Image (spheres, rainbow, N blue to C red):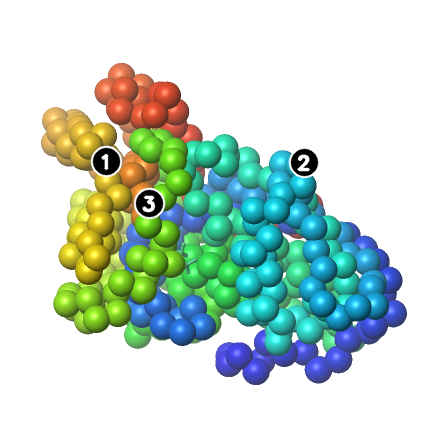
């Protein structure tokens, strides 16, 4: 599909008002997106687990209006919020060509997260996908032609991508690929697609314990970090490595080879941070406790012949990934040895989920 396929020909303009509500999940990348071109086109493909419990819930109410400016109010966790306005304004400007009814309505956006806002967990993926889904739901009501589920999901992902790249992987579950890759049929730079390959039972209901090491605002935003991949000395190597790792992961997901999975996932996390440390300007987002946790995970894995591993986002928090079969033992380990490294002892228990839901 191309950008043009996401422009509907006609709308029924008689609808005066209405309201839609969606929950959209967060996701955790196994092969990381780091580096993008203009219009939110990724430099390399990525794949993520969709999470189950870390979600944004957004209700979008719309009322017909006359003036042709964008008009919207945002309420975050019940309170009117000004801080998110510029982000939504930019988002509306980027997506306007694909949802031209945006200027015809006033929107009331009521949004909340199931995870604490100050947890250091990025809410942009779940937040942008939730609002994209609400807009697509409105478009479906206004549309004079039928819209298939496939089209709906692809366009929601396409719009979400224009809000935040990783958000395009937060529409469906359980594994989503974004970015063209030879080994993935139908993969696209424009939207995420549900991973259709075989998935061994070892990877079903995979667990993700998110250890909150640093709940503060990120020192360097992802958007700035992505830009630093321009002219980065290792960029081309990194982009081609991501293609290889995705192809390898596809085979690993089918075979159920947990040891091979651990290697790819941890290498991807450390490569992401290595790119940050070797960009100009360089920066470090890991904290001392991030490294403490990583070393404890490695020790536990060796001593217990476990398949536990870690991955990292663009921040200090650690996502601890493990098969469901190890759930009890790993949570014992987290409670006895890792909680001490979490800010205020906080961590979030999550697992792989099935994607966004209409409420
Ligand atoms: C490190 O999607 O937050 O989490 O497109 O600028 O909004 P923007 O960036 P964003 O980047 C996330 C990068 C990452 C890796 C990943 O999720 O693949």
Disc 2 and disc 1: Cα gap in Å? 33 Å
Distance from label 1 to label 3 (Cα)? 12 Å
Q: Tell me what residue is drawn at x 51 percent, y 81 percent.
A: 2
Residue that label 1 marks: 287
Q: In which quarter of the image is residue 245?
A: bottom left
- Measuring 83% from the left and 68% from the top, which residue is drawn there? 66
- In the rendered view, would you say 38 is above or below 253? below
Q: Mark 3 points at which residue?
A: 219
Judged from the image, the secondary structure of the residue bearing numbered disc 3 is loop
Q: What element carries label 1?
A: loop
Pick out the residue farthest to the top: 336
Instruction: Check if mark 1's residue and mark 3's residue have beta carbons within 8 Å.
Output: no
Ligand 1 occupies quarter: bottom left
**Whole-percent x, y for residue 308 in the image:** 24, 36
For the C terminus, which image quadrant? Answer: top right
Quarter occupied by residue 280? bottom left
Q: Label 3 crowding class (10 Å Cα cut-off): few <14, some 14-19, many 20+?
A: few
Q: Earlier in the sequence, mark 3 or mark 2?
A: 2
Q: Point out residue 26 in the picture as x, y percentages from the top left corner.
A: 47, 46
Q: In which quarter of the image is residue 79?
A: top right
Q: In the displayed structure, would residue 121 be above or below residue 238? A: above
Disc 3 from disc 2: Cα separation: 27 Å
Q: Give the label, 3 or 2, closer to the camera.
A: 3
Q: State the residue in front, 84 or 129.
A: 84
Q: What element carries label 2?
A: loop
Residue under numbered circle 2: 78
- Residue 200: x percent and y percent? 33, 50
Upstream in sequence: badge 2 or badge 1: 2
Residue beneath the point at 31% across and 31% down: 213
- From the viewer's perspective, tell me whether residue 269 is left or right of residue 24: left
């Amino acid at each position: 599909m191309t950008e043009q396929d996401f422009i509907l020909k006609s709308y029924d303009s008689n609808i005066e008002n209405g309201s839609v509500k969606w929950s959209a999940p967060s996701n955790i990348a196994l092969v990381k997106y780091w580096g993008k071109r203009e219009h939110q086109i990724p430099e390399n493909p990525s794949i993520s687990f969709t999470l189950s419990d870390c979600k944004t819930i957004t209700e979008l109410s719309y009322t017909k209006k006359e003036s042709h400016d964008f008009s919207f109010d945002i309420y975050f966790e019940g309170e009117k919020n000004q801080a998110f306005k510029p982000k939504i304004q930019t988002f509306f400007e980027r997506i306007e060509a694909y949802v031209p009814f945006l200027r015809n309505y006033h929107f009331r956006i009521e949004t909340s997260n199931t995870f604490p806002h100050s947890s250091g967990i990025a809410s942009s993926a779940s937040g942008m996908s939730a609002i994209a889904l609400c807009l697509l739901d409105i478009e479906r009501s206004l549309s004079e032609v039928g819209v298939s589920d496939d089209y709906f999901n692809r366009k929601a992902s396409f719009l979400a991508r224009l809000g935040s790249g990783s958000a395009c992987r937060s529409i469906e579950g359980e594994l989503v690929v974004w970015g063209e890759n030879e080994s993935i049929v139908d993969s696209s730079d424009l939207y995420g697609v549900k991973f259709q390959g075989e998935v061994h039972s070892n990877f079903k209901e995979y667990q993700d314990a998110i250890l909150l090491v640093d709940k503060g605002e990120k020192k360097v935003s992802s958007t700035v970090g992505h830009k630093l991949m321009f002219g980065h000395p290792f960029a081309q190597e990194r982009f081609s490595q991501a293609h290889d790792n995705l192809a390898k992961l596809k085979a690993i997901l089918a075979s159920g080879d947990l040891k091979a999975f651990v290697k790819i996932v941890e290498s991807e996390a450390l490569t992401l941070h290595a790119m940050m440390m070797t960009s100009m300007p360089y920066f470090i987002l890991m904290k001392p406790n991030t490294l403490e946790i990583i070393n404890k995970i490695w020790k536990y894995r060796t001593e217990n012949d476990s398949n536990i591993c870690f991955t990292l986002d663009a921040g200090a928090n650690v996502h601890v990934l493990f098969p469901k079969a190890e759930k009890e033992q790993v949570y014992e380990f987290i409670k006895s040895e890792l909680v001490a490294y979490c800010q205020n002892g906080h961590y979030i228990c999550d697992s792989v989920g099935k994607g966004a839901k209409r409420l």
